[in-house]
Image (cartoon, rainbow, N blue to C red):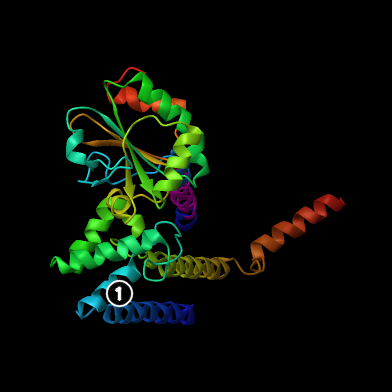
């Protein structure tokens, strides 16, 4: 029981550490317009191939979006504004990585909840095993006498 | 005893959210593809039509409009074309039709028109793809229903049907 608790705690800490590292790695740094355009293109979904980013795709639609990114950067708009302008036209769908609630948290959360339920269930089983009555106590003397009487009556 | 009560509570706690998720998910119409443009003014679009005339979306104000994104290489566009021809004929004075040519050449578009019929509405050549980007088009055919105030009321992805046209034109105040 104690080992399971430690295991759960260690796992929780591991998940927390992973989250912190992921956020630390995500800090973007500004770069040249080309680098900014490249980074934006890599975040947007190509409208007519779906599993590729605009940066990777060779379709005309992806080319049009890259052109639009360049034009907006040249007009002095920030990467956030440009991203918003695409979301306003295509919806959140255009972003390869959804914003808002970090959806990837669902998987570690599900595992943590599962572990919690498992620990709870194991603890419940142990408690029940402990509470189970042992062998019945030997009968007391008055009881023995009563039993003997009853047996005699049956015999008689 | 208390523990087993809690255990029974866990069953609805797990089942009810799941049931709710399934229920709302199945209740949705999977054919309806939402567009963030619905309820917003049509983005400013402009270009040159196949007949050489200039087109700008600012010309549309005052009358409902259908903006149909199509291409000559798009098979479903052939399917919906007769419906568009009908609509253009029936509602010539209360509805404007605009075609947007998506990733296509003017020659192929003209060949399409001479084969399947030319309704006479302007077809704007979107060679650079900027109109498609402005409208958030994912692929032809797509049709935007714009009201007289220039607000996008509905976006239809895929070939138009009689039912869709009847329903959405009525919503724009046009009796089918």
Residue B93 place in picture, x, y as percent: 27, 20
Q: Which residues are magenta?
A: B7-20
Tell me where residue A84 sits by quadrant: bottom left
Q: Secondary structure at mark 1?
A: helix
Q: Nearer the viewer, residue A144 or A83?
A: A83
Find out whether residue B14 is within the magenta segment.
yes
Residue at the image point whose x is 30% and y is 42% from the top: B49
Q: Residue at x 37, y 67 (%)?
A: A105
Location of residue B27 (image quadrant): top left
Q: Is residue A56 left or right of residue B4?
A: left
Residue that badge 1 annotates: A38
Q: Residue furthest top?
A: B175
| Left or right of residue B107: residue B94 | left
Residue B106 x %, y %: 39, 47
Q: Residue at x 54, y 67 (%)?
A: A131
The chain to which mark 1 is attached is: A
Label 1: few (<14), some (14–19) or many (≥20) C-alpha neighbours in 10 Å: some
């Amino acid at each position: 029981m104690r080992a399971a608790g430690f295991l759960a705690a260690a796992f929780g800490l591991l998940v927390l550490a992973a989250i912190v590292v992921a956020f630390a790695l995500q800090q973007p740094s500004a770069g040249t317009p080309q680098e900014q355009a490249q980074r934006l293109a890599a975040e947007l979904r190509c409208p007519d191939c779906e599993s590729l980013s605009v940066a990777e795709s060779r379709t005309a639609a992806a080319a049009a979006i890259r052109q639009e990114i360049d034009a907006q950067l040249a007009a002095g708009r920030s990467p956030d504004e440009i991203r918003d302008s695409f979301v306003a036209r295509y919806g959140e769908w255009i972003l390869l990585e959804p914003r808002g609630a970090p959806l990837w948290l669902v998987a570690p959360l599900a595992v943590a909840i599962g572990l919690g339920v498992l620990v709870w269930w194991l603890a419940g089983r142990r408690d029940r095993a402990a509470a189970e009555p042992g062998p019945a106590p030997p009968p007391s003397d008055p009881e023995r006498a009563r039993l003997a009487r009853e047996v005699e009556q049956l015999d008689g | 005893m208390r523990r087993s009560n809690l255990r029974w509570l866990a069953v609805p706690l797990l089942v009810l959210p799941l049931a709710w998720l399934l229920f709302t998910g199945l209740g949705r119409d999977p054919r309806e593809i939402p567009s963030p443009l619905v309820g917003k003014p049509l983005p400013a679009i402009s270009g040159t039509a196949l007949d050489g005339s200039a087109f700008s979306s600012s010309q549309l104000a005052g009358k409902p409009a259908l903006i149909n994104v199509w291409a000559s290489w798009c098979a479903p566009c052939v399917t919906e074309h007769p419906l568009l021809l009908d609509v253009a004929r029936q509602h010539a004075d209360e509805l404007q039709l605009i075609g947007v040519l998506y990733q296509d050449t003017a020659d192929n578009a003209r060949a399409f028109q001479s084969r399947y019929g030319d309704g006479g509405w302007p077809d704007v050549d979107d060679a650079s793809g900027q109109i498609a980007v402005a409208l958030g088009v994912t692929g032809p055919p797509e049709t935007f229903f714009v009201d007289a105030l220039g607000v996008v009321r509905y976006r239809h992805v895929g070939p138009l049907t009689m039912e869709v046209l009847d329903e959405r034109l009525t919503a724009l105040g046009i009796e089918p």
